[in-house]
């Protein structure tokens, strides 16, 4: 082999190795970016679930309210759901299905909101469920402890609100 | 040409081509990354605004400010948009065009007297609100109420009706003139920008009334609507826009219908759970009133102007319900709301 050919071969090899290293770098970088994107997606999904839980906990349709007779001011009692309102709300949604896909969908999205009574009894109540055409590929769940108020008995049970967001 | 010279030249050409390729690759990679980062920043901004609105909406009495660095948003048909992306579909009282350095949002509750929904108001400090009032008690009542409920960071000016021609211009892109129980003035030449007029007049009961929206651009009235309570007056002024306002109040009445339904069912459940005849009667009477209210709010959600016709029955039923609720409270029985 002539000297010039050897030099050419040498240069080509150097470049080839350089591009292989760059290629490996790109593969590692794209893997890292893919992981970051996945992490961000999960983070956004979790934030969405928290948003939905926050909205659900403060819906006047189900939240306990405290009225002050003197000031005529009504405020939501934090972390408390009125079980008679929950029953009536489920009934309302059953009678007005168009609201599931419009007003409540804008707030609660594709989600299932359950109230799981833990003490004194173990029972589950569905507050809202709208899955549309979602196939539950990526679900994010968020749990909030709640007091479940039974106004007719004037008693409270302890439970957890489970918000499952179908992404 | 000698072979050695050809080799050197070829090497240089080879290095130049390879160097250009590497440089082009690096530049493409940087540009791609820049695009990805810009998209990430954009989606972060969208996410931030959405969380911000959800937070404000979820509880009353919240007041928040978020830097938006010149972003231009639009609000129409209950959709807040940034470019083609829908940020939120919450009911917001906001101007149809929102731009500036800071997004201001505050929330309050709409109670009739039972809690119906939380309402959020959104604007920027670059939107100017001019409250035009006179010395009459109703005008002053409206002025004090609005001033107390508006966010402190909003740009508000106060001017007496007689001094309206001396008003100074501050180059705002959007100006709302709120005529508080005074007649709307159809000519406002001293102030530049997109200008809207809102004339708010109480009925005889000082709780309901009419709102007229005027556009100084088209020199025409955009529409006439009604209000039910101070929260709606505030909404009319913050948005300054007839279609935004009218759609939102329809939604508020729709919510009032839904809550009336829920409370009626609650009252019926409480009645069957009580063994005291008097109290059972109160629950029963409350359920009947709530059924009437449900029907009235349904009418209003379709056509808010029906308020002019039904306001007497509506206020009477709400008052009676409030009395029943107080009675239940004083008897230490579970209240309806």
Image (cartoon, helix red, strand yellow):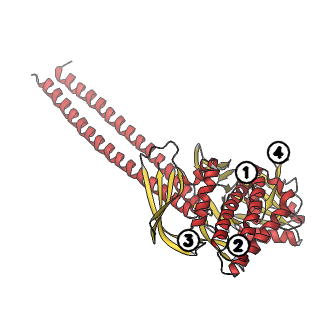
**Could you tell me how far apart the alpha carbons at marks 4 and 2 are, in whole angstroms?**
58 Å
- Mark number, residue B247: 1
Tell which circle, 1 or 4, labels the residue nearer the N-terminal end: 4
Under circle 1, the secondary element is: helix
Q: Is residue A165 visible?
A: yes
> Is B120 on the left or on the right of A157, as rendered?
right
Spatial separation of the CA atoms under disc 1 and disc 4? 21 Å
Which chain is disc 4 placed on? B
Q: Is residue B180 visible?
A: no
Image x and y of residue B33, in percent: 41, 44
Sequence-wise, the earlier of marks 1 and 2 is 1
Residue visible at 56% across and 56% down in the picture: B49
Q: Quadrant of residue B1?
A: top left
Rendered position, A21 above or below A157: above
First in sequence, mark 4 or 2: give its number: 4
The residue that mark 3 highlights is: A149
Residue at label 4? Answer: B218
């Amino acid at each position: 082999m002539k000297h010039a050919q050897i030099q050419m071969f040498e240069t080509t090899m150097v470049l080839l190795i350089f591009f292989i290293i760059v290629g490996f770098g790109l593969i590692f970088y794209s893997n890292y970016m893919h992981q970051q994107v996945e992490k961000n997606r999960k983070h956004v999904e979790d934030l969405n679930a928290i948003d939905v839980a926050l909205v659900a906990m403060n819906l006047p349709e189900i939240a306990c309210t405290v009225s002050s007779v003197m000031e005529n001011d009504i405020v939501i009692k934090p972390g408390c759901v009125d079980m008679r309102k929950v029953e009536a709300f489920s009934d309302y949604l059953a009678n007005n299905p168009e609201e599931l896909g419009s007003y409540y969908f804008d707030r609660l999205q594709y989600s299932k909101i359950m109230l799981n009574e833990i003490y004194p009894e173990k029972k589950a109540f569905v507050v809202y469920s709208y899955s549309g055409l979602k196939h539950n590929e990526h679900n994010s769940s968020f749990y909030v402890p709640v007091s479940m108020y039974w106004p007719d008995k004037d008693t409270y049970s302890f439970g957890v609100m489970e918000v499952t967001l179908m992404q | 040409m000698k072979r050695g010279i050809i080799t050197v030249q070829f090497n240089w050409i080879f290095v130049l081509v390879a160097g250009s390729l590497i440089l082009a690759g690096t530049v493409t990679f940087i540009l791609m990354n820049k695009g990805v980062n810009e998209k990430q920043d954009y989606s972060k901004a969208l996410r931030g605004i959405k969380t911000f609105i959800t937070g404000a909406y979820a509880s009353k009495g919240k007041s928040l400010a978020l830097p938006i660095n010149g972003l231009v948003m639009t609000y129409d048909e209950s959709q807040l948009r940034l470019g083609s992306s829908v940020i939120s579909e919450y009911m917001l009282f906001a101007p149809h065009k929102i731009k500036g350095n800071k997004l201001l949002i505050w929330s309050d509750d709409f109670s009739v007297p039972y809690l119906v929904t939380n309402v959020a108001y959104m604007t920027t400090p670059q939107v100017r609100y001019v409250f035009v009032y006179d010395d009459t008690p109703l005008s002053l009542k409206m002025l004090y109420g609005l001033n107390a409920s508006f966010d402190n960071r909003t740009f508000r000016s106060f001017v007496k009706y007689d001094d309206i021609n001396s008003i100074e211009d501050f180059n705002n892109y959007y100006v709302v003139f709120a005529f508080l129980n005074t007649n709307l003035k159809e000519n406002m030449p001293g102030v530049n920008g997109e200008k809207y007029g809102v004339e708010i007049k109480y009925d005889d009961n000082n709780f309901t009334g009419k709102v007229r929206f005027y556009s100084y651009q088209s020199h025409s009235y955009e529409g006439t609507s009604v209000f039910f309570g101070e929260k709606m007056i505030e909404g009319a002024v913050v948005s300054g826009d007839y279609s935004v306002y009218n759609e939102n109040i329809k939604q508020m009445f729709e919510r009032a219908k839904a809550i009336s339904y829920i409370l009626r069912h609650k009252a019926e459940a409480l009645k069957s759970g009580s063994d005291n005849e008097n109290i059972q009667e109160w629950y029963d009477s409350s359920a009947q009133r709530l059924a009437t209210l449900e029907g009235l709010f349904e009418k209003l959600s379709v056509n808010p102007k029906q308020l002019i016709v039904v306001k007497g029955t509506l206020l009477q039923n709400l008052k009676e319900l409030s009395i029943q609720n107080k009675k239940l409270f004083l008897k230490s029985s579970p209240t309806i709301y």
